[in-house]
Amino acid sequence: MRVALMATCLGDALFPDVPRATVVLLRRLGVDVDFPEAQTCCAQPMINTGYVDEAVPVVRTFVRAFEGYDAIVAPSGSCVGCARHQHGLVARRGADPGLAAAVAEVGPRVHELSEFLVDVLGVVDTGAYFPHDVTYHPTCHSLRMLGVGDRPRRLLEAVRGLRLRPLPAAEECCGFGGAFAVKNADTSVAMGADKVRHVRETGAEVLVAGDASCLMHIGGLAARQRAGIRTMHLAEVLAHTEEPA
């Protein structure tokens, strides 16, 4: 099976440890994963802000970069949601039958990390060891657009040493929402503050999520409150194997 890593813009620019951990994890599980250097943005920021025409060449670049792979794996529910559900809209807007065909071919092969591990590889126990109190935030795109369900939780529950604590109001949005956080800053901060409060109520040391964008938002607010909460991506926890000597 030919597998490609979709690193995402945030992973490339701000959180390189996340795509790096994804590669470490997949290789440990026997997956020979490639990194197509032609990849750029998935076009989500443009599509979500109404610049659909401008997104056409970006989507064209995406399908060219990832064509020929059996699976494309990304540590981001929002980027995967864009590739699977929004690229078709862009292709139709561009009135390009060739692009529409390419999107229809590539889109279904794009997988969020927990989907790929559980559904494609059939793996729940990744061999990870992480002896900490953890709570999990299900991000909006992974929860609502992709329907990943309990896959991330099952993966975390199988991590040796990890103590998973339930998060109150877990399915409430953290308030980031990309451009929403900029255009509606006060509302975004209020929603994020609610999320931080719920995280603190769990007593967990670490907040885990499947999207770096949500972790960036929640982590920034938690840091301003000096809440003492560390944020980590699901991939980073699942790639962790160090045990005390």
Image (cartoon, rainbow, N blue to C red):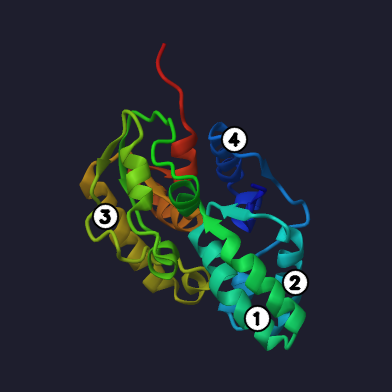
Please, what secondary structure does the residue beneath circle 1 have?
helix
Asked if the residues shown at circle 2 and circle 4 are in contact, with their CB atoms under 8 angstroms apart, the answer is: no
Residue 136 visible at all: yes
Mark 3, residue position = 197
Assess whether mark 4 and mark 3 are in contact (beta carbons under 8 angstroms).
Answer: no
Q: Secondary structure at mark 4?
A: helix
Residue 191 placed where, x, y %?
34, 66
Q: Position of residue 141 (x, y in %)?
A: 44, 66
| Spatial separation of the CA atoms under disc 2 and disc 4 | 29 Å
Closer to the N terminus: mark 2 or mark 4? 4
C-alpha separation, residue under disc 2 versus residue under disc 3: 42 Å
Mark 4 residue crowding within 10 angstroms, few (<14) / some (14–19) / many (20+): few
Q: Secondary structure at mark 3?
A: helix
Reading the chain from its start, which is encountered first: label 1 or label 3? 1
Q: Earlier in the sequence, mark 4 or mark 1?
A: 4
In terms of depth relative to the viewer, which is nearer, 157 or 133?
157
Q: Amino acid at mark 2?
A: Arg
Callout 1 amino acid: Val
Q: Are marks 1 and 3 in contact (CB under 8 Å)?
A: no
Residue 228 location (% of width, % of height): 34, 40
Quarter the C terminus occupies: top left
Residue 107 as seen in the image, left or right of residue 223: right
Residue ranking furthest to the top: 245
Q: Are marks 1 and 2 in contact (CB under 8 Å)?
A: no
Q: Which residue is mark 2?
A: 60
Please name the residue that numbered disc 4 is placed on.
Answer: 27
The disc placed on residue 90 is: 1
Q: What is the x, y in percent for residue 230? A: 40, 41
